[in-house]
């Protein structure tokens, strides 16, 4: 009983510290120690094995996925500093008009994240333009958070097949699937997330206008002119080239296999056997091409790339330490009881699986952390129940992107910090598009998978 209470105390403390802006690396270590002590776990072994070097250890995860984090951060830095990301957003402004500010933000963020730009970079890249557009359209700033969260943190991160996000890569290392696994479910789920999310944002925009609620900047906001934003940027077509290269490089081996081309090719065999390394290579390749294409990067290519690699350290450490905390939790009796209860709940396997990953992601406040824990501790149980690996891959990734975005989620806290808003001001909109909408989309897809 003490162990279970200690486990709950550790989880509650992690959430409490995250909500108060405590560094997640520090918080994860402290909360892991609480769980170790209250569960009577061998301190040294738990700290240096379960937390750091075990199957769910922080350093084990960091070593396994370092190249992907670094490649994504480098690509994000190159796309940001070259103003290619801004160019894509401005092209949407020209096509749709500034009055479609929310649509522009969602589509721009979606294009960038599906092309491999990491979420934190996307927020920084589109925020100045978002402020300008929302001011012109007199749309409340809280809806900017909702639009960015929908575009950068939902359908392109977990649902659409082929995305090089860490969430889409993690299951491949356990299931032997590829990044396009469960494509039909992903396309349906992604369409539902986008559609319901936009319906909600547009409804809120109209309600705000009817209630006289308009745009109010934060004291620290600098709202640039569109001419200022547009300076020194490549054409929109040129800006899209690196994004297309990332997806094209990832897709090429699969298309070659489907068309019966390149049989026996060492490159195709290598790509299919390297679910982490191949997307990393795609991102690096696109970064090099971008450095050649864009003058802003061509003037300082090595500096931009090295700064991008540095950008990967904190997101990687934050994710890794949450997973290290999960490694400690996974070795407690309480967690094993949860695993057994989920597997033997009597619910249909797909529904039970969705509930299990949702709870784990919600507890950790991290979809990637929840995925790694689930894949290491529960995936085999559900495969043994007869779930198709491709369906398991897509549904568990989609489900991980729901309750992970509760108020203590690190990405949510970072976005609110960047935008200068509080949970009270903006979380309702963020929560609707990143928790409620993905949960609905996932349940619909679970239902379809059970029928078909």
Image (spheres, helix red, strand yellow):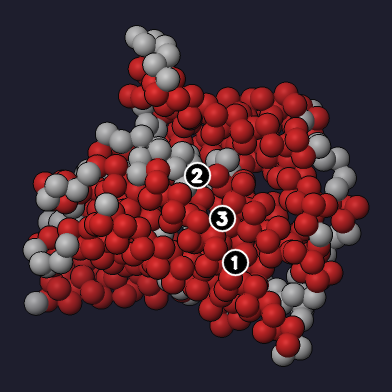
Query: Which numbered disc, 1 or 3, marks the residue closer to the eye?
Result: 1
Of labels 2 and 3, the one closer to you? 3
Secondary element under disc 3, as helix, strand or loop, is: helix
**Crowd band around label 3 with a 10 angstrom C-alpha radius: few (<14), some (14–19), many (20+):** many
Q: Position of residue 336 (x, y in %)?
A: 12, 61
Asked if 361 appears above or below 406 in the picture, the reply is above
The answer to which image quadrant residue 205 occupies is bottom right
For label 3, the residue is 152
Q: Helix, strand or loop at disc 2?
A: helix
Q: In the rendered image of this protein, does residue 38 appear above or below residue 94?
A: below
Residue drawn 53% across the image and 78% down it:
428
x, y (%) of residue 111? 62, 47
Q: Tell whether 220 sits left or right of 57.
A: right
- Residue 237: tell me if it is visible: yes
Q: How far from the left and from the top, in percent, is residue 73?
A: 56, 41
To which residue does mark 2 refer? 313
How far apart marks 1 and 3 lie (CA) works out to 13 Å
Q: Is residue 162 above or below residue 400?
A: above
On the question of residue 49 being in view, the answer is: no
Along the horizontal axis of the image, is 320 left or right of 392? right
How far apart marks 2 and 3 lie (CA) works out to 20 Å
Asked if disc 2 and disc 3 are in contact, CB closer than 8 Å, the reply is: no
Q: Which mark is residue 198?
A: 1
Q: CA distance from mark 1 to mark 2?
A: 33 Å
Residue 366 picture quarter = bottom left
Confirm or deny contact between disc 1 and disc 3 (CB under 8 A).
no
Q: Earlier in the sequence, mark 2 or mark 3?
A: 3
| SS at circle 1 | helix
To which quarter of the image does residue 292 belong? top right
Q: Residue at x 75, y 35 (%)?
A: 237
Sequence order check, earlier mark of 1 and 2: 1
């Amino acid at each position: 009983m003490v162990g279970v209470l200690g486990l709950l105390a550790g989880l509650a403390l992690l959430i409490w510290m995250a909500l108060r802006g405590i560094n997640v690396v520090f918080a994860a270590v402290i909360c892991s120690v609480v769980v170790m002590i209250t569960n009577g776990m061998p301190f040294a072994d738990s700290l240096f094995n379960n937390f750091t070097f075990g199957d769910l250890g922080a350093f084990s995860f960091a070593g396994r996925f370092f190249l992907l984090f670094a490649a994504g951060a480098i690509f994000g830095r190159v796309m940001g500093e070259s103003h290619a990301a801004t160019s894509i957003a401005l092209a949407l402004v020209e096509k749709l008009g500034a009055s479609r500010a929310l649509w522009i933000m969602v589509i721009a963020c979606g294009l960038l994240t599906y092309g491999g730009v990491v979420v934190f970079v996307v927020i920084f890249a589109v925020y100045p333009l978002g402020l300008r557009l929302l001011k012109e359209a007199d749309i409340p700033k809280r809806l900017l958070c909702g639009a960015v969260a929908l575009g950068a943190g939902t359908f392109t991160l977990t649902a659409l097949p082929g995305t090089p996000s860490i969430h889409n890569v993690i299951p491949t290392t356990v299931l032997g699937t590829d990044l396009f696994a469960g494509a039909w479910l992903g396309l349906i789920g992604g369409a539902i997330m986008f559609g319901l999310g936009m319906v909600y944002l547009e409804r809120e925009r109209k309600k705000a206008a009817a209630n006289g609620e308009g745009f109010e900047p934060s004291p620290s906001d600098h709202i640039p002119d569109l001419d200022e934003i547009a300076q020194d940027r490549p054409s929109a077509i040129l800006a899209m080239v690196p994004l297309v290269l990332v997806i094209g490089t990832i897709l090429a081996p699969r298309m070659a296999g489907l068309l019966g081309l390149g049989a026996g090719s060492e490159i195709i065999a290598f790509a299919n056997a390297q679910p982490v390394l191949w997307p990393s290579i795609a991102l690096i390749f696109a970064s090099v091409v971008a450095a050649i294409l864009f003058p802003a990067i061509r003037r300082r290519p090595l500096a931009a790339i090295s700064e991008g690699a540095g950008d990967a350290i904190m997101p990687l450490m934050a994710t890794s330490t949450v997973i290290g905390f999960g490694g400690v939790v996974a070795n407690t009796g309480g967690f094993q009881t949860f695993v057994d209860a989920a597997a033997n709940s009597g619910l249909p396997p797909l529904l039970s699986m969705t509930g299990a990953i949702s709870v784990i992601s919600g507890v950790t406040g991290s979809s990637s952390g929840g995925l790694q824990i689930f894949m290491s501790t529960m995936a085999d149980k559900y495969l043994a129940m007869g779930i198709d690996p491709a369906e398991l891959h897509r549904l568990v990734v989609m489900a991980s992107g729901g309750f992970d975005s509760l108020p203590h989620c690190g990405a949510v806290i970072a976005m609110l910090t960047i935008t200068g808003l509080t949970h009270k001001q903006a979380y309702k909109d963020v929560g609707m598009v990143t928790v409620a909408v993905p949960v609905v989309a996932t349940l619909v897809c679970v239902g379809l998978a059970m029928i078909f």
